[in-house]
Amino acid sequence: MSNVTAKTKICIIIGDPIEHSLSPLMHNAAYQSLGIDDKFVFLAAQVKVENIEKVVNAMRVMGVRGLTCTIPHKVAVMKYLDEIDPIAEKIGAVNTVVNENGNLKGYNTDWLGVVTPLEKIGKPLKNMKVALLGAGGAARAMAYGVTQKGAHLTIYNRTLLKSQELATEVNAECKNLANMDLTDTDVIMNSTSVGMGDKENLTLVPKEQLHRDQIVFDAVYNPYETRLLKEAKGQGANIIHGMDMLLYQGIAQFELYTGFTAPEEVMRQTLLQHFQVLK
Ligand code: ATR
């Protein structure tokens, strides 16, 4: 039986499309495990980007506690908020809006989804040589996260102009994908869509460039383990799944919405079960 009552606070993710989102699953499982599923419920709604102002107004008048923004709302939402956290301002995107008694404050937790699993491996990012493949939406949190921690970043993108823009913002180098050699790189991060959908059997990194002293991080979470990650694992590298990025941005967001410490293992197992990779 549901524990939702008239006192339950609403958190909601908006996006277009939205049906694939795993946030409701992950957050509701966490509420349930802490016994706070009478206090919070996490929903989802498909919203067109031109309706974002109406959603923010509805959040105010309905007292919605949390608004999670995914594509295409992360930039568009910003101008309707009362306050923006300085890190979100710098990244130029908000994925988390907290309603504190009518004051709407925007945060970005995507970069923590990048930095937290990298730091858990135990090697400080400071002065590490990091390569980022891609320069689209997902690349921004990755680029910001590692440069913020003092890594030396090189961005490789098919379209050089896009990587040049991002590189200027985060003070990184940029190079063309065509003649890439990552043998000398400590951390490789893929933010491109290569490895998923109709590109599931593809990878941008030749296996010969992967080795055991590297960390390889793929933002792609479907499939759970991409060809890049399988090959990196085969070569003895440390790997970080795209699911971890989803998990750790969600953990930071959970704590902003509820004020409780997130039940990390419950959230991880919920996502793993979804991918049917039970540990
Ligand atoms: P997202 O917001 O999910 O990052 P995006 O903004 O469309 O999606 O970015 C997709 C990234 O994948 C881009 O860096 C894109 O390269 P371009 O900037 O050259 O378009 C990259 N990408 C997609 N398909 C690719 C392919 N077949 N080879 C190399 N890069 C590819």
Image (tube, helix red, strand yellow):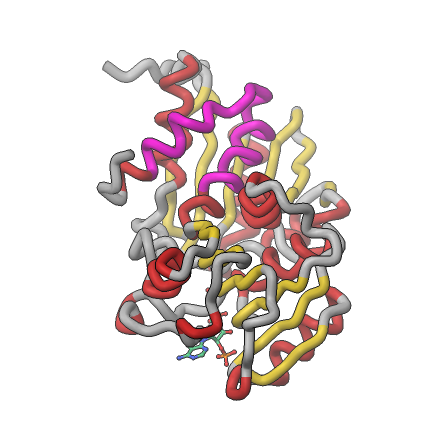
Name the residue located 29 percent from the left edge and 68 percent from the top edge: 200
Residue 194 drawn at (x, y percent): 38, 71
Residue 63 drawn at (x, y percent): 55, 28
Could you say which quadrant of the image residue 166 lies in? Answer: bottom right
Residue 255 magenta: yes
Name the residue located 43 percent from the left edge and 52 percent from the top edge: 242
Q: From the viewer's perspective, is residue 108 above or below residue 192?
A: above
Left or right, 57 with reference to 6: right
Residue 214 drawn at (x, y percent): 53, 58
Please report the bounds of the magenta region as a residue range: 247-271
Given residues 164 and 278, the one toward you in this image is: 278
Could you say which quadrant of the image residue 41 lies in? Answer: top left
Q: From the viewer's perspective, is residue 102 above or below residue 125?
A: above
Residue 116 drawn at (x, y percent): 58, 41
Residue 27 magenta: no
Q: Quadrant of the C terminus?
A: top left
Name the residue located 70 percent from the left edge and 72 percent from the top edge: 167
Q: Quadrant of the N terminus?
A: top left
Given residues 128 and 57, the one toward you in this image is: 128
Helix, strand or loop for the magenta stretch, by majority: helix
Q: From the viewer's perspective, is residue 160 above or below residue 32?
A: below
